[in-house]
Amino acid sequence: LIDCRSRETTAVDIDDPELRILVINSNMKHELTGSEYPDRVRQCKEAVAGVNEHLGDSTRTHLRDITMEELEAANAAGKLSEIAFKRARHGVSEDVRTQAAAKAAQVKDYETVGRLMIESHNSLRDDYEVSIPEIDFLVEQACKQDGVFGSRDTRGGV
């Protein structure tokens, strides 16, 4: 795991001779040109500001500082646009999923890791809206295979 604030890393031991991890190149081009990436950054910042406004303080600076409960409360209070809420919901839930997957991997609970990977992909597709049909197809097909625990998009910029 990489803590992007402190730049600290934590190794997650996945040393299991029974496990195979595949990284599949889809050959699908992914470019961070245009406004999509800066738009998502702006939308996430809007969500942080909306949560701070709802809570009456400015202590949160990034999505990682927000709980899902705080995000949902700010949304229910009308402090977030629908799109800012979706983008932030992905970021907040992705942080929770990543931490949970690391813990599950440590105890070789690969079914949980797989479920979290699928949830991650669905969130990338539905809330962050960065997946594409070809990648969705690959994820879906991979998950239909015997012995596959999970699959998700891992392209750069997502």
Image: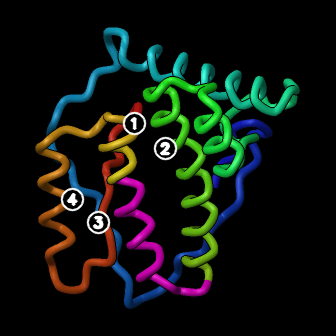
| Relative horizontal placement of residue 80, taking residue 158 as reference (left or right) | right
Q: Residue 89's spot in the image, x, y percent?
A: 52, 43
What is the spatial separation of the Cα atoms under label 2 and label 4, in whole angstroms?
Answer: 18 Å
| Residue sitting at x 40%, y 72% | 115
> Looking at the image, do the residues carrying marks 2 and 4 touch, with CB atoms under 8 Å apart?
no
What residue is shown with label 3? 22
Label 1: state its secondary structure. Answer: loop
Q: Which of 117 and 14 is in front in this view?
A: 117
Label 4: state its secondary structure. Answer: helix
Q: In this view, does 54 lie above or below 123?
A: above
What is the spatial separation of the Cα atoms under label 3 and label 2, in whole angstroms?
Answer: 24 Å
Magenta: main secondary structure equals: helix
Q: Which of 14 and 45 is in front in this view?
A: 45
Q: Residue 94's spot in the image, x, y percent?
A: 53, 51
Mark identifier at residue 139: 4
Mark identifier at residue 90: 2
The residue carrying pointer 3 sits among few (fewer than 14), some (14 to 19) or many (20 or more) residues within 10 Å by Cα, namely: few
Tell me which numbered mark, 2 or 4, is placed earlier along the sequence: 2
Going by the numbered disc 1, the residue's amino acid type is Tyr
Tell me which numbered mark, 3 or 2, is placed earlier along the sequence: 3
> Looking at the image, do the residues carrying marks 2 and 1 touch, with CB atoms under 8 Å apart?
yes
What residue is shown with label 1? 128
Going by the numbered disc 3, the residue's amino acid type is Leu
The quadrant of the image that shows the N terminus is bottom right
Going by the numbered disc 2, the residue's amino acid type is His
What is the spatial separation of the Cα atoms under label 2 and label 1, in whole angstroms?
Answer: 6 Å
| Relative horizontal placement of residue 113, taking residue 34 as reference (left or right) | right
| Residue sitting at x 60%, y 51% | 95
Tell me which numbered mark, 4 or 1, is placed earlier along the sequence: 1
> Looking at the image, do the residues carrying marks 4 and 3 touch, with CB atoms under 8 Å apart?
no
Q: Give the range drawn in magenta.
A: 107-121
